[in-house]
């Protein structure tokens, strides 16, 4: 049914870069047979899933939304993919994204934009717009995303879906093509909070192949999602993440959510995180610095395409130059230049070093806020889905979409976006944030509000 739905609507939406028809049907019929034979199966066995094309898969191409990796087939599976196979979930295919996950609208994909199922003239968020649009358009019941600065939560927000960025280290990054390694995290996109919990339990848990993987389990997420409640919970409204700069319709839905939570027995308190105003600036130094280093391997030799210079001499530098000039799009080049500059000798302390200090201040703000509240709350994105092309020529306006999501990545704490109603007919997302390793609180609060 999902493959039929993809065939029917994906021509308009373009959520998928690759549809994995044969393998998906094979896995599904294997599950049918196993069930008929009375085999014990995982709850999600036979439930199909779409995979953001930043996560490597055997048997399906992985492009990262870039010309650089066009046609590339990974020789190994990401850990999350091995776990999805073990649960016997059919993979429907690979979903579109901003090139190397850099963007907030999926317009920076080398393979053309994805459209928002709520309004085809509007963006589905980014960078994981393909995964969110697939779920919102009923092409897939579940999807995987990656979140470095909001790429799961912001697309979920503008498509009326649920999106979770787990605690840093809660889900293995092995096989997620690296953007900024200290910020990246794989997580679920779904239509309900319980669905997300079921998926996070499949993909999460310790992995010796990821040196930053947590060794302790994060708790029973499914139970938390089944027993959603905010009774007696202290919910901290982050003063700095609302009001000015937030679309009036978004603010209105947010204020209503607070009323609903109060009625459900939560205690609403105001918390202040004064350093969050520096989060975006610090992120746009740390992320490009790490990305410029991570992307150095796409040099025409080790990975991806190779382009030879038009004129001799055929030196290695000129092959690298020609390959990277042709293989990377403008946004990726912009960030490589920013990152290389920030890391260059003589500037390191002024830029990267200062940004790391800001990161510590943001962590301290979170610590202080979590001393006053069990979870924090804010709108996920300051605005609803904007029109295609509207912010494409204005990188700063594009970056501002992530003001509310970036602090969580900077501190490694988990966050969830859940649908919070509509403003002018378009979905608004509400974000909960919890202390590191307390993902259960997100599921409990999220399930109470959804
Ligand atoms: N939109 C943000 C950026 O462009 C976040 C990206 C992400 O989370 N992968 O950097």
Image: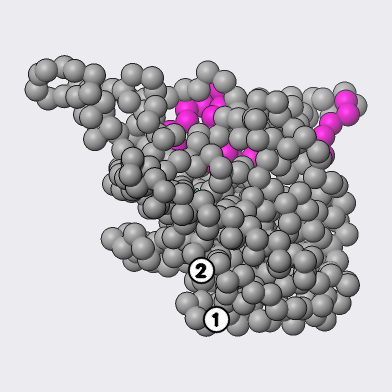
Instruction: Tell me the number on the disc at residue 243.
Output: 1
Q: Residue at x 42, y 24 (%)?
A: 72
Secondary structure at numbered mark 1: loop
Q: Earlier in the sequence, mark 1 or mark 2?
A: 1
Q: Name which residue lies at 74% across and 82% down.
A: 259
> Is residue 267 located in the magenta-colored stretch of the structure?
no
Residue 246 placement (x, y as % from top left): 51, 77
> How dense is the environment of label 1, judged by Cα within 10 Å: few (below 14), some, or many (20 and up)?
few
Give the main secondary structure, helix, strand or loop, of the magenta stretch.
loop
Reply above or below: 438 against 241: above
Q: Is 50 one of the magenta-colored residues?
A: yes
Left or right of residue 241: residue 99: left
Q: Cβ(mark 2) to ligand 1 < 8 Å?
A: no
Up/down of 282 relative to 257, above or below? above
Q: Which mark is residue 277?
A: 2
Residue at point 56% right, 46% down? Answer: 183
Q: Residue 293 location, x and y as percent?
A: 41, 35
Could one spot residue 341 in this view of the protein?
yes
Magenta span of residues: 39-64
Q: Which mark is residue 225?
A: none
Query: How far across and down, in percent of the image, does residue 381 sit?
Result: 54, 67
- Residue 142 locus on image (x, y percent): 66, 46
Q: Is residue 27 visible?
A: no
Tell me the residue at 74%/64% (across/down). 370
Q: Quadrant of the C terminus?
A: bottom right
Tag 2: Cα neighbours inside 10 Å, few (<14), some, or many (≥20)? some
């Amino acid at each position: 049914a999902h493959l039929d739905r993809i065939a029917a609507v994906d021509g308009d939406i373009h959520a998928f870069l690759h549809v994995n028809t044969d393998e998906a049907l094979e896995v599904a019929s294997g599950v049918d047979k196993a069930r008929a034979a009375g085999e014990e199966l995982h709850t999600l066995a036979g439930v199909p899933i779409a995979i953001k094309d930043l996560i490597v898969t055997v048997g399906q191409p992985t492009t990262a939304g870039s010309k650089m990796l066009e046609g590339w087939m990974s020789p190994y599976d990401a850990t999350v993919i091995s776990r999805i196979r073990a649960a016997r979930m059919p993979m429907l295919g690979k979903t579109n994204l901003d090139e190397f996950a850099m963007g907030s609208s999926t317009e920076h994909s080398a393979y053309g934009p994805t459209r928002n199922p709520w309004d085809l003239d509007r963006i589905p968020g980014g960078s994981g717009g393909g995964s969110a649009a697939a779920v919102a358009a009923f092409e897939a019941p579940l999807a995987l995303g990656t979140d470095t600065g909001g790429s799961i939560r912001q697309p979920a927000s503008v498509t009326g879906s649920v999106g979770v960025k787990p605690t840093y280290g809660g889900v293995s990054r092995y096989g997620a093509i690296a953007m900024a390694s200290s910020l990246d995290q794989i997580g679920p996109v779904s239509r309900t909070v319980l669905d997300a919990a079921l998926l996070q339990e499949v993909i999460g848990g310790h992995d010796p192949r990821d040196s930053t993987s947590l060794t302790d389990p994060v708790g029973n997420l499914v139970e938390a999602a089944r027993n959603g409640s905010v009774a007696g919970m202290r919910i901290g409204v982050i003063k700095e993440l609302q009001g000015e700069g937030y679309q009036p319709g978004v603010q209105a839905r947010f204020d209503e959510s607070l009323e609903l939570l109060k009625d459900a027995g939560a205690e609403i308190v105001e918390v202040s995180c004064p350093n969050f105003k520096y989060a975006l600036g610090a992120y746009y130094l740390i992320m490009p610095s790490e990305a410029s280093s991570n992307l150095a391997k796409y040099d025409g030799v080790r990975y991806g395409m190779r382009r030879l210079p038009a004129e001799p001499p055929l030196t290695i530098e000129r092959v690298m130059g020609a390959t990277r000039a042709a293989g990377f799009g403008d946004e990726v080049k912009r960030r490589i230049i920013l990152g290389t500059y920030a890391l260059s000798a003589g500037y390191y302390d002024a830029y990267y070093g200062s940004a790391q200090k800001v990161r510590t201040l943001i962590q301290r703000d979170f610590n202080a806020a979590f001393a006053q509240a069990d979870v924090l709350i804010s709108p996920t994105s300051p605005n609803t889905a904007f029109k295609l092309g509207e912010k494409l020529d204005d990188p700063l306006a594009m970056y501002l979409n992530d003001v509310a999501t970036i602090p969580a990545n900077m501190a490694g704490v988990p966050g969830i976006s859940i649908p919070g109603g509509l403003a002018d007919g378009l979905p608004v997302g509400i974000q909960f944030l919890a202390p590191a390793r307390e993902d259960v609180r997100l599921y409990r609060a999220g399930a109470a509000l959804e």
